[in-house]
Image (spheres, grey):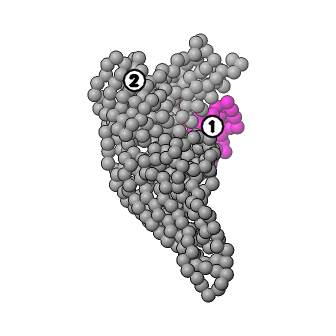
């Protein structure tokens, strides 16, 4: 922006009469005019910025009519639609696992500040139905602004398509008669061992999503295969898969005395940590790592903790290097996911669903219809991911007048049902 333009903006702001904008109008709407063009000041300010990546999204919003206040309901419907636009745009930038894990942060710093991301919008159509007012909005959302915000709050930096991880690590420090492990207790323990804490903190910093055991049902009853410290790969994969993990890291950490020193009150201590990382979709091991660390302290348990932290840091760096190299190589390969769509009552609903799937679901490269009959369609989806990540993505999509119910997810496919949203009786 030139100095003259800045001066002109300042003059316009000073001459603008107080109350020129109606107080009932949402803040996001104040930067747009009918027809979807940015108003003068907002447009001038945006013109002075760098290149702005945008996306146009259509969405329906709904507002409840209270005490016959239709105008207020319309404002609420527009605000609802614009928030939905921002939510959908966020889903195009980060993974659905990230949306779930950081939902509170997204709500506070992104979803509740739609005016920061909507460049302009226009209402395509609107209607009153009973106690609700509905609008369909076409909004231009700034993807650049959303990416900047996600980076500033630490979400985009943290999550860049790396897997969700769950740990199954047993640990035995000096003075403990047997290994401790979280899955062998009732209720399930949420306490993190020294080894798990060190591994999870390092891997979270590097971009991995860690399953939070605090969110698990502590009263869940596990089978006999989970009663020992030596957990099988199959048992860990089964539970990890149920809890949304892409990888399970299985292993053990053991601390031992390693000899004597001249000081009779201290003995050298050595910890050994051995781990393996297993994919939950295939059961294949993609990383193996083992590390040792030593400690010397007058308090044996303190020395053991120091040794565990040292050995865990060695293992963490090695695991991250192996997993990132293997994972990024694998996720770049597209796969065909079999998609079965049931509950098709109107062919037009299916067409809208298929178009939305092809154009708006992140990672979908193409959709191939194999056949449709008796309210059921079979498709192959060319997708950068796997069946479970496609199911996750579909669960967080908003479809006009439709709800998607995922009924089955297998290694190769997804089965879902389209459920129409019935309009309230007027």
Q: Of the numbered discs in the image, which one, if any, rests on residue 263?
A: none
Compare residues 275 and 73 and report the one nearer the observer: 275
- The verdict on residue 23 being magenta is yes
Percent position of residue 36, x then y: 50, 33
Front residue (pair 165, 75): 165
Instruction: Measure how far apart labels 2 and 1 are at the Cα level.
Output: 41 Å
Depth check: give the residue in front, 334 or 73: 334
Q: Where is residue 148 in the image (x, y as percent from the top left)?
A: 52, 51
Please name the residue shown 39% across and 33% down the image.
Answer: 414
Q: Is residue 280 above or below residue 415?
A: below
Residue 126, relative to residue 50: is it above or below?
A: above
Does the magenta segment cover residue 21? Answer: yes
Quarter residue 41 falls in? top right
Q: Mark 2 points at which residue?
A: 342
The residue closer to the viewer here, 114 or 202, is: 202
Left or right position of 384 against 86? left
Q: Which residue is drawn at 65% across and 40% down?
A: 16
Q: How crowded is the residue under tag 1: few (<14 C-alpha within 10 Å), some, or many (20+)?
A: some
Secondary element at image label 2: strand
Q: In this view, does 253 lie above or below 394?
A: below
Q: Which residue is drawn at 49% across and 41% down?
A: 242
For label 1, the SS is: helix
Residue 47 visible (yes or no) = no
Q: Name the residue under label 1.
A: 27
Residue sitting at the far top: 426
Residues shaded magenta: 7-36
């Amino acid at each position: 922006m030139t100095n003259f333009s800045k001066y002109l903006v300042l003059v316009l702001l000073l001459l603008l009469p107080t109350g020129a904008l109606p107080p009932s109008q949402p803040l996001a709407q104040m930067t747009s005019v009918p027809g979807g063009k940015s108003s003068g000041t907002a447009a001038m300010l945006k013109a002075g910025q760098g290149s702005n990546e945008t996306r146009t999204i259509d969405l329906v919003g709904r507002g409840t009519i209270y005490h016959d206040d239709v105008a207020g309901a319309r404002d609420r419907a527009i605000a609802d639609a614009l928030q939905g636009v921002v939510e959908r745009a966020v889903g195009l930038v980060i993974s659905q696992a990230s949306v779930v894990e950081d939902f509170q942060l997204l709500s506070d710093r992104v979803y509740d500040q739609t005016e920061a991301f909507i460049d302009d919008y226009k209402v395509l159509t609107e209607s009153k139905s009973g106690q609700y007012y509905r609008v369909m909005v076409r909004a231009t959302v700034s993807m650049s602004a959303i990416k900047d915000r996600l980076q500033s709050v630490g979400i985009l930096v943290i999550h860049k398509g790396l897997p969700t991880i769950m740990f199954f690590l047993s640990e035995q420090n000096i003075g403990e008669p047997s290994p401790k492990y979280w899955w062998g207790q009732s209720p399930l323990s949420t306490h993190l061992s020294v080894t798990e804490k060190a591994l999870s903190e390092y891997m979270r910093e590097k971009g991995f999503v860690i399953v939070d055991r605090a969110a698990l049902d502590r009263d869940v009853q596990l089978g006999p295969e989970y009663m020992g410290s030596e957990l099988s790969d199959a048992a860990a994969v089964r539970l990890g898969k149920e809890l949304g993990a892409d990888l399970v890291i299985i292993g053990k950490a053991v601390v031992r005395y390693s000899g004597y020193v001249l000081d009779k009150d201290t003995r050298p201590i050595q910890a050994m940590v051995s781990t393996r990382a297993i994919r939950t979709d295939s059961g294949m091991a993609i990383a193996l790592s083992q590390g040792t660390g030593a400690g010397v302290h007058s308090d044996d348990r303190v020395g053991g903790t120091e040794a565990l932290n040292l050995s865990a840091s060695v293992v963490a760096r090695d695991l991250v290097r192996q997993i990132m190299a293997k994972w990024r190589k694998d996720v770049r390969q597209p796969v065909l996911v079999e998609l079965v769509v049931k509950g098709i009552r109107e062919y037009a609903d299916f067409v809208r669903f298929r178009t939305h799937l092809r154009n708006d679901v992140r990672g979908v490269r193409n959709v191939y219809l194999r056949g449709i009959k008796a309210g059921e369609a079979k498709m192959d989806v060319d997708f950068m991911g796997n069946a479970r990540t496609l199911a996750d993505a579909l669960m967080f999509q908003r479809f006009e007048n439709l709800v998607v119910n995922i009924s089955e997810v297998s290694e190769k496919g997804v089965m879902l049902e389209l459920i129409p949203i019935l309009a309230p009786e007027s």
